[in-house]
């Protein structure tokens, strides 16, 4: 009796992708490998039991990042409608395709595909299994946020313009454009430039900057009026 052989061929990729927080730097370290591992069996001159084009990126993830798993790309003999994937880590924990958030640690994933007999005495038994392919990914603990404070806030640039004069040309008030520098405890300096109308010597000028999720506010007395000429 002639043996029936089916071939399953799918587009290939196994992706590990880290989704970094929008305010943080994206993960820059990537790794890739592209290879085919065969189990040595041949069917009509075609190597079977092969997962092709395995690739992964973002191998160092931070706690809270999302690990996305998708798999394809297998050449294997067996019934076309009984292909099953197996994705497990070093502890034997099984994973499905899709998104996963993992605890800190190093994970070694083993990926295999198998086909099963459809009927006959061996129905339900494994027909063919690919050689295993493995990828590793490290999830590191999220660093504790360091509180940032304002060390100092001072006017670093300003310019007065005449707001109004009286009938004799005497200046009665000024408009002001001023820039304040906020020096932060982490060494950064942020700037806020504001325009103020009819500035009076007795008033306070408000400035603010946003750093991450923090808003820093300060009030500063106006710089001295220009010296009359």
Image (cartoon, grey):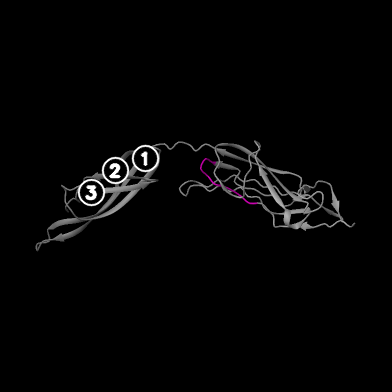
Residue at image mark 1: 184
Judge left or right: residue 43 versus residue 18: right
Q: Position of residue 42 (x, y in %)?
A: 85, 51
Q: Position of residue 90 (x, y in %)?
A: 66, 37
Is residue 63 within the magenta segment?
Answer: yes
Which mark sits nearer the N-terminus, 3 or 2? Answer: 2
Please tell me the numbered disc located at residue 205: 3
In the rendered image, the quadrant that contains the C terminus is bottom left
Q: Nearer the viewer, residue 118 or 108?
A: 118
Disc 1/disc 2 C-alpha distance (Å): 12 Å
Disc 1/disc 3 C-alpha distance (Å): 20 Å
SS for callout 1: strand
Q: Is the C-beta separation of discs 1 and 3 under 8 Å?
A: no
Which mark sits nearer the N-terminus, 1 or 2? Answer: 2
Crowding around mark 3 (Cα neighbors within 10 Å: few <14, some 14 to 19, many 20+) is: some
Task: Give the magenta part as a residue range.
Answer: 62-70
User: Image quarter for residue 153?
Assistant: top left
SS for callout 3: strand
Q: Position of residue 228 (x, y in %)?
A: 16, 52
Crowding around mark 2 (Cα neighbors within 10 Å: few <14, some 14 to 19, many 20+) is: some
In the rendered image, the quadrant that contains the N terminus is bottom right
Residue at image mark 2: 154
Judge left or right: residue 77 versus residue 104: right
Q: Is the C-beta separation of discs 1 and 2 under 8 Å?
A: no
Of labels 1 and 2, the one closer to you: 1
């Amino acid at each position: 009796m002639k043996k029936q052989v089916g071939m399953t061929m799918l587009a290939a990729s196994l992706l590990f992708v880290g989704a970094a927080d929008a305010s943080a730097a994206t993960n820059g370290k990537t790794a890739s490998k592209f290879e085919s591992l065969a189990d040595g069996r041949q069917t009509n001159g075609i190597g079977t039991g092969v997962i092709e084009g395995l690739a992964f990126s973002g191998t160092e993830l931070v706690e809270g990042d999302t690990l996305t798993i998708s798999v394809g790309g297998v050449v294997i003999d067996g019934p076309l409608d009984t292909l099953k994937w197996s994705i497990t880590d070093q502890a034997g924990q099984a994973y499905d395709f899709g998104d996963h958030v993992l605890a800190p640690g190093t994970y070694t994933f083993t990926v295999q595909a198998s086909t099963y007999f459809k009927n006959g005495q061996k129905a339900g038994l494994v027909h063919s299994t690919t050689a295993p392919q493995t990828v590793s990914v490290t999830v590191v603990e999220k660093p504790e946020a360091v509180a940032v404070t304002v060390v100092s806030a001072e006017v670093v640039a300003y310019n007065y313009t005449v707001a109004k004069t009286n009938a004799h040309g005497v200046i009665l008030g000024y408009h002001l454009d001023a820039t304040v520098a906020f020096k932060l405890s982490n060494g950064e300096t942020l700037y806020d430039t504001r325009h103020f109308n009819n500035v009076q010597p007795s008033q306070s000028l408000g400035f603010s900057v946003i750093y991450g999720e923090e808003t820093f506010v300060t009030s500063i007395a106006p710089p001295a009026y220009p010296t009359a000429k």
